[in-house]
Structure formats: structure tokens, C-alpha cells
């Protein structure tokens, strides 16, 4: 028995939708929950020049949201217009839209919010004798009492769309989202005071102050203490903020803030750029924490991408991606033993930035970015093998502090030129007295534990170093520095490798030919559905050509930049460094231990090994006292 054919649906006529339904559809894009209302209305308050913004909530914002500001206000005759769809004072032409410099510009928020709630607008301009209040539901406009500024009352959100209201979470959850929305604004505008009230009680407050103080107030002391300052000027881009150290990485990506011209965004391109800077310093699937502020001329970024204005599109996306990656990489290059307090931020910036005046917009890579300081005199693989061969008949110093024979000639940690060797402190000079080692962040070696850990003493207490992990990073950074100085050598394939490709892959191969060539790849279409790889990076001779090509094309298509080749090369270097580093159970003498400590102090990213594990830990005197109950 055959199933009956489905009934042919009756044709419905094409007609214009009523204005209220149009606004409710728009509200579905703009107003997701109470926090969306808070975000949109705080945007408007900031555009009005407010320096004080108060957010008052009832039932997590579900029952009531009141936003008050001391901005310029809205004239009485413009209040009814403000509630109409696509009515705004922020843009008036296509040229304005292409260089938006305000938080809002679409003219949708008030109309959309009013369509799904009971909204009232109260405002007063500086020259008005009194304020005016407009009820969005009835349209009634009348006099009211208020100082200069605007108050917007939003009550019973989604009261006329019960299906939407059922999807809201608990009051506590919605309150947390509202507070987070204000927190994101507070991070970007330290010159504005923000307060959040719930059920008549003050739950959060951030007073106007300096940017570094606002970051500390919003994200906490621990974030500032476990992060590094980021400050870079690259062409027309300025990147500032703080990037968390790998040690402070979290299990969730819940402390990642990126701003473009003061607007909080969730952009895959920027997130990928930041994540790539952490590639060889994060362990497992840990998530970095950061707060980055990117300033770019408005005409170089399109903010009219998503109704919620949380996504942006850059005209030079590849340059932006690389700039963000290098800015964060440069900040992370400073080891943890380097001072990271706010007072040290200018020094960090001076060491890792290029003045804007000397870098034309999107010029050559060498002009866009001043390279980070290279590791000097690090240990190579051959030197490592030679150094850690069984020691000669020379008498090894005692592992106990002060017992080293000063006349003994110490074994150098690595082979280097005379000048670098002369600049390195030896154990003989280190043993001359405490004053000689006061400036050594990792202190001076005092012994070895289990053939794995080096113990050292500095002014804070005890330093414990995993010698294999530390030496592995030193070798790895030297190999990376050597690789970065040379262009990627391409190896032609005797027989081209072909594979079936999607339309996106074919289009990417055609449009990104120059970028692929720089990566050592020659990929070109031989039919509308087939790509041929005619060359690959010589360093990756053992790699799967098809998988490599697909990975590179996927990243280029999504981010307009690819780190696949560099990532693969670095994985090879990491393997080489791991096998070339000193092994566990190798007994080091004190000169070797001290030379290892000095190498760590001058090596970038020395706090983690190539796999993201820590290389050293500090145990303070206070912590030691607590272990032995001293002072109790």
C-alpha cells in the first residue's frame, strides 16, 4: 500500500508585514535576553557622552531594567522619532556608515526593545527647563522631573511573546549575564563610572580612573599579577592591554576580552591570532586569559556585519591577524622572572613595539614589526651532545653551596664566541659573594635533586628547575631563531599530488597563490574540482602532502592567514629539541647548573617547555616558614 501524497499547500499572497511584527522580528536578532537590552542601552548612553551610567535591575532584568545616564539627553520633539525603526542621529550617509565611530548606528535597538516590552523614555537636554517622558505603548508625552541625561525603563521583557520568555534562564543566571555585559563596557571605558543595582542593592561598581586601575578593578588583582602588558603600534593599528601568562591559563575561555575601537567583539580572526601566539606555551586544551584593545581607523573596519554588532570585518584581515599574533607573542616572550607589574609596562612596550611614525601602513613585514630580541648563545644540538657526555677526570664541584673550588675551570653550558662567553657569569664569579648574584632572577645553584631538578637560591627563597624542560626550551628557541632568519625553501615534487577539492578550496588556491608561495606550496587547479600540489616545504618532506594542503587552505579560507606550515616546522623543531636536551639522571656540576639558569634568564618563553609544562617554580621563604610552622 503506497503512502498518500502530501497535500499541496495553498498559496499565500505576498504582502508587507505590519511594522510591529517587523520590529519583533528585528528584536529576535537584537534582543536575546535582558543582557542584550543592557548592552544596547549602555551603548546609547556612551554615545551620548555619559560619564556616569547606572543599571538598575529587578528579577535579573526580566521584570525591569532601568538605565540612567548623565549624557547630552534627547530633545522633546525627537523622543517619538527615537522609537521609530532605523531612526538615529549617528549616521546620515554611506560615507558615515563606512567609517562608524560610535557604538550604535543601526537605529534598531529602541524600536526592537519597545516591541517586546513595556518601554518608557525619560530625557532632558542641558538647555531644557525640564525633562519629558514618553510612553512607547501609548505614545503619551508629558513633562517629568529629571536632571540632564536620559533614563530608559524596560519592564516585563517578552510579555507579549511568551514563547521567547520561556527560553530565559533563572533570575540569577540572567543577572550574571547582565553584570557581564556592563563589565565588558567598563573594561573599554575607564573614563566612565558604572554601577549595577539589583533589587535595590548595589552589586557592582566601577569608578572612573586610569586604564590599568580599571583592568585591576574589573578582572581582579590575580589577573594583573599573572599577565603581561601588551603594547604595540603596527602600521595603522595600535594594540594594548594585557595577556595572561601560560601558567594562569584556565579550563574555560571565560576571561577573553577583545575590543575593536572600544567595541567588544567575538571575532574568529582575532581569537585565532591570539591563540596562535600561545601555541607552544600552553599545555593541553587550556585556555588563555587576555584583555586586548585594538584601535584602527574606522574606515579600515566594517562593523555593519551582525545586528548585535559583535562581529567585525577588516579590510586587511591578514595583516591584522599577524599583528595581533606578534603583539601577544612579543609580550609572552618575556619570562616570568622579568618584572610584570604596571610600572614595568613602559619598558616592555619599548622593547617590543615599533613606533607608528616609522611604520607605513601595511608595508613589508620587516617594516611592520620590530623583531623580538633573539636568544644569544643558546645551546645547539651538537653542543648539547658534546656537553652532556660523561665528565672528564676534572673534579666536579660539591653540590653544596659554598663548597665549589674557586680555582677549578668550570665546564661551559654551551659553545659560543669569546665575547658571549666573557659576558656570562661563571660559578667562580657567582661564588664570590651574595652581592654578585643579587640581580639574577633565578639566583645561584645550590644542588640537584634526583638527577631531575636543579635547586637554586634567590632573594625570594628557593627556586626549583626542571632541567630537561628548561634546557629543551633553550634549544627550541635557538632552532626557531635560526629558522626564522631563512625563507621557507620549497621542494618541487617529481610527480604532482592531486586531490579532489571543494569549490571553497579551489577558490582559495586561486586567490591566495602568493600566500601559498611564501609558505613553500605550489597549489593550482587542474579542473573545477581538482587541485594539484607541485611543491611543498623542504623541511616537511615526510608530511602528508594532501593533508598539509587541505589544512593550509582551510586556514587561509577562514582567517586569510595560515600558521600550518610554521606549526608543523615548530613541531619538528620541538622533537629535535626534546631529544637534544639534557636527560634526567645526568649529574650536573654547579657551573653547569648556574650556566643553565643564566641561559633561562635570557631565553624567550623560558617559563614553559615546548609542550607547555612549567620549567621552574618559586617557593618563597614565607611558604617555607609555613611548612615548618615557624612563627606560629
Image: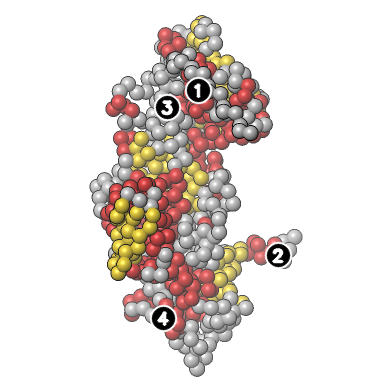
Give the x, y percent position of residue 176.
Answer: 61, 35
Image height of 227 relative to 296, above or below: below
In the picture of the structure, the residue carrying the numbered disc 3 is: 104
Distance from disc 2 to disc 1, alpha carbons, whole Å, reads: 63 Å
> Which residue sits furthest front?
1
Distance from disc 2 to disc 4, alpha carbons, whole Å, reads: 41 Å
Distance from disc 1 to disc 3, alpha carbons, whole Å, reads: 19 Å
In the picture of the structure, the residue carrying the numbered disc 4 is: 383
Sequence-wise, the earlier of marks 2 and 1 is 1
Residue at the (45%, 29%) spot, across then down: 307
Q: Are marks 3 and 2 in contact (CB under 8 Å)?
A: no
Residue at the (72%, 66%) spot, across then down: 628
Q: Nearer the viewer, residue 28 or 223?
A: 28
Number of residues whose C-alpha sits closer than 10 Å to that of mark 1, classed few (under 14), some (14–19) or many (20 or more): some
Q: Are marks 4 and 1 in contact (CB under 8 Å)?
A: no
Of badges 3 and 2, the one in the foreground is: 3
Of badges 4 and 1, the one in the foreground is: 1
Q: Are marks 1 and 3 in contact (CB under 8 Å)?
A: no
Residue at the (50%, 94%) spot, across then down: 393
Sequence-wise, the earlier of marks 4 and 1 is 1
Give the x, y percent position of residue 31.
Answer: 53, 26
Distance from disc 3 to disc 4, alpha carbons, whole Å, reads: 60 Å
Image height of 585 relative to 350, above or below: below
In the picture of the structure, the residue carrying the numbered disc 1 is: 25
In the picture of the structure, the residue carrying the numbered disc 2 is: 627
| Secondary element at image label 1 | helix
Sequence-wise, the earlier of marks 3 and 4 is 3
Amino acid at each position: 500500500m503506497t503512502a498518500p501524497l502530501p497535500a499541496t499547500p495553498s498559496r499565500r499572497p505576498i504582502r508587507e508585514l505590519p511594522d510591529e511584527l517587523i520590529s519583533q522580528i528585528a528584536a529576535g536578532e537584537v534582543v536575546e535576553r535582558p543582557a542584550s537590552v543592557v548592552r544596547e542601552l549602555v551603548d546609547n548612553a556612551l554615545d551620548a557622552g555619559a560619564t556616569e551610567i547606572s543599571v538598575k535591575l529587578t528579577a535579573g532584568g526580566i521584570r525591569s531594567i532601568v538605565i540612567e545616564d548623565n549624557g547630552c539627553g534627547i530633545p522633546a520633539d525627537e523622543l517619538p522619532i527615537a522609537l521609530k525603526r532605523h531612526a538615529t542621529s549617528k549616521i546620515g550617509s554611506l560615507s558615515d556608515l563606512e567609517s562608524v565611530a560610535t557604538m550604535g548606528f543601526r537605529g534598531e535597538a529602541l524600536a526592537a526593545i519597545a516591541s517586546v516590552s513595556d518601554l518608557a523614555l525619560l530625557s532632558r537636554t542641558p538647555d531644557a527647563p525640564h525633562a519629558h517622558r514618553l510612553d512607547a505603548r501609548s505614545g503619551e508625552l508629558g513633562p517629568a522631573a529629571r536632571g540632564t541625561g536620559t533614563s530608559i525603563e524596560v519592564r516585563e521583557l517578552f510579555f507579549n511573546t511568551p514563547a521567547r520568555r520561556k527560553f530565559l534562564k533563572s533570575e540569577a543566571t540572567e543577572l550574571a549575564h547582565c553584570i557581564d555585559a556592563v563589565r565588558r563596557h567598563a573594561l573599554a571605558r575607564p573614563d566612565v563610572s558604572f554601577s549595577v543595582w539589583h533589587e535595590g542593592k548595589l552589586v557592582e561598581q566601577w569608578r572612573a580612573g586610569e586604564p590599568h586601575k580599571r583592568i585591576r578593578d574589573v578582572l581582579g588583582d590575580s589577573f594583573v599579577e599573572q599577565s603581561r602588558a601588551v603594547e604595540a603600534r603596527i602600521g595603522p593599528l595600535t594594540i594594548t592591554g594585557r595577556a595572561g601568562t601560560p601558567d594562569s591559563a584556565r579550563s574555560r575561555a571565560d576571561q577573553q576580552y577583545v575590543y575593536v575601537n572600544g567595541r567588544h567583539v567575538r571575532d574568529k580572526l582575532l581569537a585565532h591570532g591570539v591563540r596562535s601566539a600561545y601555541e607552544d606555551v600552553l599545555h593541553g586544551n587550556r585556555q588563555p586569559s587576555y584583555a586586548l584593545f585594538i584601535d584602527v581607523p574606522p574606515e579600515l573596519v566594517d562593523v555593519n556585519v551582525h545586528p548585535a554588532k559583535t562581529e567585525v570585518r577588516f579590510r586587511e584581515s591578514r595583516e591584522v591577524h599577524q599583528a595581533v599574533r606578534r603583539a601577544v607573542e612579543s609580550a609572552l616572550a618575556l619570562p616570568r622572572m622579568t618584572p610584570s607589574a604596571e610600572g614595568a609596562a613602559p619598558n616592555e612596550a619599548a622593547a617590543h613595539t615599533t613606533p607608528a611614525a616609522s611604520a607605513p601602513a601595511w608595508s613589508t613585514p620587516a617594516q611592520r614589526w620590530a623583531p623580538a630580541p633573539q636568544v644569544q648563545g643558546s645551546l645547539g644540538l651538537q653542543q648539547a651532545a658534546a656537553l652532556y657526555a660523561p665528565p672528564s677526570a676534572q673534579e666536579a664541584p660539591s653540590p653544596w653551596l659554598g663548597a665549589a673550588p674557586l680555582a677549578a675551570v668550570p665546564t661551559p653550558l654551551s659553545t659560543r664566541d669569546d665575547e658571549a662567553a666573557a659576558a656570562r657569569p661563571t660559578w667562580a664569579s657567582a661564588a664570590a659573594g651574595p652581592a654578585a648574584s643579587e640581580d639574577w632572577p633565578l639566583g645561584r645553584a645550590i644542588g640537584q635533586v634526583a638527577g631531575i631538578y636543579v635547586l637554586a637560591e634567590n632573594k625570594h627563597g628557593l627556586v626549583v628547575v626542571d632541567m630537561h624542560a628548561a634546557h629543551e626550551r633553550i634549544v627550541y628557541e635557538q632552532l626557531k631563531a635560526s629558522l626564522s632568519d631563512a625563507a621557507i625553501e620549497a621542494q618541487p615534487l617529481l610527480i604532482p599530488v592531486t586531490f579532489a577539492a571543494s569549490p571553497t578550496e579551489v577558490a582559495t588556491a586561486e586567490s591566495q597563490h602568493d600566500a601559498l608561495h611564501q609558505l613553500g606550496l605550489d597549489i593550482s587547479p587542474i579542473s573545477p574540482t581538482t587541485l594539484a600540489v607541485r611543491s611543498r616545504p623542504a623541511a616537511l618532506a615526510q608530511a602528508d602532502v594532501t593533508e598539509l594542503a587541505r589544512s593550509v587552505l582551510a586556514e587561509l579560507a577562514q582567517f586569510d592567514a595560515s600558521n600550518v606550515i610554521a606549526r608543523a616546522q615548530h613541531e619538528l623543531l620541538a622533537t629535535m629539541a626534546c631529544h637534544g636536551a639534557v636527560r634526567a639522571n645526568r649529574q650536573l656540576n654547579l657551573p653547569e647548573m648556574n650556566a643553565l639558569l643564566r641561559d633561562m634568564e635570557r631565553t624567550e618563553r623560558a617559563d614553559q617547555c615546548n609542550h607547555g609544562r612549567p620549567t621552574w617554580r618559586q617557593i618563597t621563604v614565607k611558604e617555607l616558614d609555613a611548612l615548618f610552622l615557624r612563627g606560629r
